[in-house]
Image (cartoon, rainbow, N blue to C red):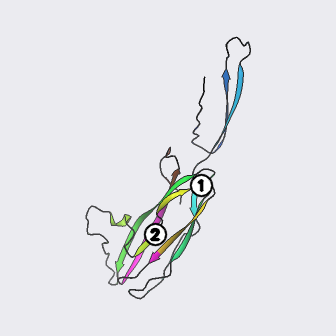
Amino acid sequence: ADVKIWCFPQDKGVFEDRLVAKIEHNPEPVIFGLCAVGEVPSAFLDSEEVDFGRLMMNIRAEDQRVRLKNSSALPLRWQILCQDAQVVDSEGAQVSTSTDPEIDISAVVPEEFTVEPMDGTLAAGEERELRISFRATRPASFSFNLLLNVRDAEGLRDWQDSG
């Protein structure tokens, strides 16, 4: 008979147990030692702020690059989300970035910016470069946060804020 054993630790650390098998016509049970290493998916960005400075209208800024690294011992999925986006025009008034009233504009990267890629997978210890582009199409000040969420590659756990 086949025996399949799965282990999904919720915390970091080493977990040990044993499997005791009683075999017909064998007076002694057979003991199998089991060991699993628990890991939590985690990743980080090598920069906390990207600043394009002041630009003239219709000028494309030089791309900024940020490195994303999987700092855990297991493969993970990642995604970048926009948070608290604000666009203020030259008069100091808040500007809407969407004509759709159903869209939370604070959760959308302003159209003047491009972040590529916005999601993907990383093997244990793997790094990837994210490219952030900006083109000044109107006189305004832009401010927003990019939130990095991670989860295990198999999707066994929920998304977690990674920084």
Q: Residue at x 59, y 36 (%)?
A: 7
Which amino acid type is marked by label 2?
Val
Callouts 2 and 1 close, C-beta under 8 Å: no
Q: What is the tally of numbered marks visible in this picture? A: 2
Which amino acid type is marked by label 1?
Ala
From the viewer's perspective, tell me whether residue 128 is left or right of residue 91: right
Q: Nearer the viewer, residue 144 or 7?
A: 7
Within-10-Å neighbours for mark 1: few <14, some 14–19, many 20+? some
Element on which disc 1 rests? loop
Within-10-Å neighbours for mark 2: few <14, some 14–19, many 20+? some
Q: Is residue 93 above or below residue 74?
A: below
Q: Residue at x 31, y 78 (%)?
A: 93
Mark 2 vs mark 1: in front: 1
Q: Nearer the viewer, residue 154 or 145?
A: 154
Residue placed under numbered mark 2 in the picture: 115
Q: Is residue 145 above or below residue 90?
A: above
Residue 63 at x, y percent in the picture: 50, 78
Q: Residue at x 42, y 74 (%)?
A: 113
From the viewer's perspective, tell me whether residue 157 is left or right of residue 58: right
Residue placed under numbered mark 1 in the picture: 123
Residue 35 at x, y percent in the picture: 68, 36
* Magenta segment main secondary structure: strand
Residue 150 at x, y percent in the picture: 51, 54
From the viewer's perspective, tell me whether residue 7 is left or right of residue 88: right
**Residue extent of the magenta highlight:** 133-148
* Res. 3 image quadrant: top right
Q: Nearer the viewer, residue 49 or 56?
A: 56
* Res. 94 image quadrant: bottom left
Asked if residue 73 lies in the magenta stretch, the reply is: no
Q: Nearer the viewer, residue 113 or 121?
A: 121
Distance from disc 2 to disc 1, alpha carbons, whole Å, reads 21 Å
